[in-house]
Image: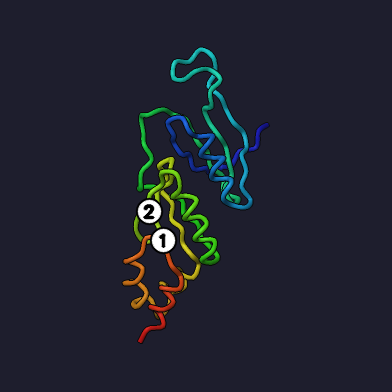
Amino acid sequence: MIDQPKVCTCLWFNSQALPAAEFYCSLLPNSRIGRVGYYPEGQEMEKPGSVLTVEFTLAGTPYQALNGGPHFKLDEAVSISISTEDQAETDHLWESLTADGGAESECGWLKDKFGLSWQIVPKRLVALLTGPEAAKVWPALMQMKKIEIAVLEAAANAD
């Protein structure tokens, strides 16, 4: 019997499921590629033997990538949020995910080269937005693309 998680997010790709999963797994510890499924003989969608599904784990969370063709596109309605420990981790993930055709958005959101949306959220931001400094931090956050912890700290400490 094959072990399968009870709940798993499936991400639809045209034909880049395996390269996307490999890229994502390279960015976070405790990540790995699991099973890869292939299109069988006798179907009309894709060349038999090409990748159909990729099961992978990102930082311990299970996902599935599907090469389903051009019928559906990834969009900002769904994103993966990563909680970062510090500015160095935030910068590394931001630079990696926006490279090679990715795009910055607002307030810690970005889109990677495969079209998947991400939120790169420093833990310190969450603390500042849920603390007594929130009213001072919020305007600074609204001016940012990538989150800059030092700028948020300065806003929180401003008189």
Mark 1 Cα shell of 10 Å, populated few (<14), some (14-19), many (≥20): many
Color theme of the render: rainbow
Which of these two is toward me, 79 or 94? 94
145 w.r.t. 130: above or below: above
* Residue 89 numbered tag: none
Q: CA distance from mark 1 to mark 2?
A: 8 Å
User: In which quarter of the view is residue 115 placed?
Assistant: top left
| Residue found at the very far right of the displayed protein | 1
Q: Position of residue 107 (x, y in %)?
A: 37, 61
Which of these two is toward me, 98 or 55? 98
| Residue found at the very far front of the displayed protein | 100
89 w.r.t. 35: above or below: below
Q: In the rendered view of the protein, which quadrant contains the C terminus?
A: bottom left
- SS of the residue under disc 1: loop
**Residue ID at (57%, 37%):** 55
Q: Left or right of 144: which side holds 82?
A: right
Which of these two is toward me, 76 or 102? 102
Q: Position of residue 65 (x, y in %)?
A: 50, 36
**Residue ID at (68%, 31%):** 1
**Residue contact at pointers 1 and 2, CB within 8 angstroms:** yes
**Residue ID at (41%, 78%):** 154
- SS of the residue under disc 2: strand
Q: Left or right of 56: which side holds 155?
A: left
Q: Position of residue 48 (x, y in %)?
A: 53, 17
* Residue 104 numbered tag: 2
Q: Count all numbered tags in the image, as a single digit.
A: 2
Question: Of the residues shown, which amino acid type is indicated by label 2?
Answer: Glu
Question: Of the residues shown, which amino acid type is indicated by label 1?
Answer: Lys
**Residue ID at (43%, 40%):** 114
Q: Which residue is mark 1?
A: 146
Q: Earlier in the sequence, mark 1 or mark 2?
A: 2
Mark 2 Cα shell of 10 Å, populated few (<14), some (14-19), many (≥20): some
